[in-house]
Every structure is written in structure tokens, then in C-alpha cells.
Image (spheres, rainbow, N blue to C red):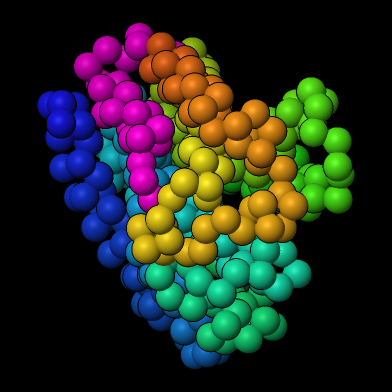
Amino acid sequence: MSDSADSLQASWSGWKTQVEQALAKYLTTDGGLGGECPPRLREAMSYSLLAGGKRLRPVLVLMACEACGGNSDAAVPAACALEMIHTYSLIHDDLPAMDDDDYRRRRLTNHKVFGEALAILAGDALLTLAFEVTARDVRPTAVAAACCADLAFAAGACGMVGGQVADLEAESQTDRGTKMFEHLQSIHRRKTGRLIRSALTMGGRIAQADVATLGMLDHYGTCIGLAFQIADDVLDVTGLEDKLGKGVGKDAGLGKLTYPGLIGVDRSRQMARDLINEACLAIAPLGERGQRLQAMAWFVLERDH
């Protein structure tokens, strides 16, 4: 393992702990979720939000802030908000009307424990809480407003939600030619990539990065976001269920449009590698401060879960 990879793992472990402690506090009565929240709703929100995972997106917020010379502690609220949005999307994605998954992170999905109605409402509540946390706790207020705009665009009709709709529509299409490859890239730039891009730009904003630096971070985020989805598609074909913590091989069974399905596993892996190289070049001007971001990019490619 390289020095930069060692540094990444050490920092990631600390940041992950910091984020998880903050997430737990945000779900308490004193920490942000008021006493009028129904206990069963709070339980359903906690069940998914505190279920662990890599915490990739919030860690990217903190990492980007630090790479731009900022104090990562100031970015924790934004990091938590992004994880709330990501978690809400997973709760909804697992529903019978969507991917109909029984397991997530090695345990039953939210709707299997709390029922479909409460799972939907828990997702809605996490989405809403994310904007409350950002508006209230990110400072200065101008940066909070910009971060709210980043999150809304990334999560909304032109971002994650729009990408999910396009993904569902693609299931019924049988053409697997060049146009569908372009369509697949468009789906995942929105469905997966936009939230990852927002992690980088929010971290940069909180560090008061200039426009050029924000542009570098956005380019990096675009590349690793797409590479992350390609790697995810490959893992659904080649991965082990006990490592992933969820079922494998479901994409093909559902008729989903995937990179291995269109261009094969080997070409998919090469495409992801090219994107990681491009991501690292994008942030090269950051010098030593960008080393952990470069190590993170290679983790995205080489992960097994």
C-alpha cells in the first residue's frame, strides 16, 4: 500500500467516525430532530442512516474542504446532509416499485422492517432534514445557500431523480447500440455522478475555494462519479454477495442497462481506469494537498464492495 493510500485510510477512518457521530446526534431531540417527531419514524430514519457503509460521499466533502485549505470540521454539517440524501435515495430505491431489494448493508431493507408506507416517509424525512441541516448549520449563510442549491440540483429532476427515471425507462428498451451507450452515460452522470460532484463542490465552497478550483473539483467529481457507477455495474457481475452486503446479478435479471451488458466487463474496467486517470489529472494543480483525492480515485476503481 502506498503512503498516499495509507494516509487516505487513516483519514477516512477518522472522518467516518466523525460523520457517524454527527449523524447520530442529528437524529436526537437535542441535536436537530424535534420532540414532535413520531418515535417510529425516528426509528425508521435511524435504521437506515446509521447502518454504516463506506460513507464515501460525506468523506469526499471533508476531503475536498481540506484539499482546498479549509477546516474539515466546518464541512461536517454539509457532509451529513449529503449522506441523508444518499440514504433517502437508497430507502426508496429498495422499494418494490423500484428495485425490490430485500437486503442492504447485510441486513433487511427499510421497507422489509417498517413497511412500505413508513419507509417512504422515512426517506422523505431524511431528504427534508438534509436541507434543514445545511441551511441552519453551514456558515457563512451565503455558502449555506450555495450548498443548498448544489444539493437541490444534484438530487432533483435534473440530477439523481431524473437519472433514476431514465434508468427505469431504459429497462423496457431493447436497443443496445451506440445511442443506448450515450444514454447510459447520461443516466449515470445524473443518477450517481451528480451527488458525488456536489460533495466536491460543497467541500470547496466551505473552504472558500476560487472558481478555478471549484471547476477542477467538479471535473474530478464528474470522472470519479461515472467510474464509481461502472465499477458498481462490474461488481454486480463479478462481486461476492457477502462482501457487497446485498444481492448480486440483479441488474441483468431486471433488464437494467449496464456497462458490462453493453460493452463487456473488460472494456468497462478500462473505461473506468481512463476516467480515474482523467480525474487525477484534473486535480494535479492541487499538488500535495490533492494526494488523498488521488488515492480516493483509485479506491473507487479497485474496491471490491
Which of 210/108 is in front?
A: 108
- The residue lying at 15 percent from left, 26 percent from top is 2
Up the image or down, 100 lies above or below 205; here it is: below
Q: Let me know if residue 300 is in the magenta part.
A: yes
Q: At which x and y percent is residue 107?
A: 43, 75
Up the image or down, 260 lies above or below 106; here it is: above
Up the image or down, 160 lies above or below 281; here it is: below
Q: How many marks?
A: 0
Q: At which x and y percent is residue 19?
A: 32, 56
**Residue that lies at the very extreme toward the bottom in this rendered image:** 39
Q: Answer with the quarter of the image where residue 253 lies.
A: bottom right
- The residue lying at 71 percent from left, 49 percent from top is 256
Q: At which x and y percent is residue 40?
A: 52, 90
Q: Answer with the quarter of the image where residue 153 lies.
A: top right
**What predominant SS class does the magenta segment belong to?**
helix
Q: Quadrant of the image for the N terminus? A: top left
Q: Which residues are magenta?
A: 282-305
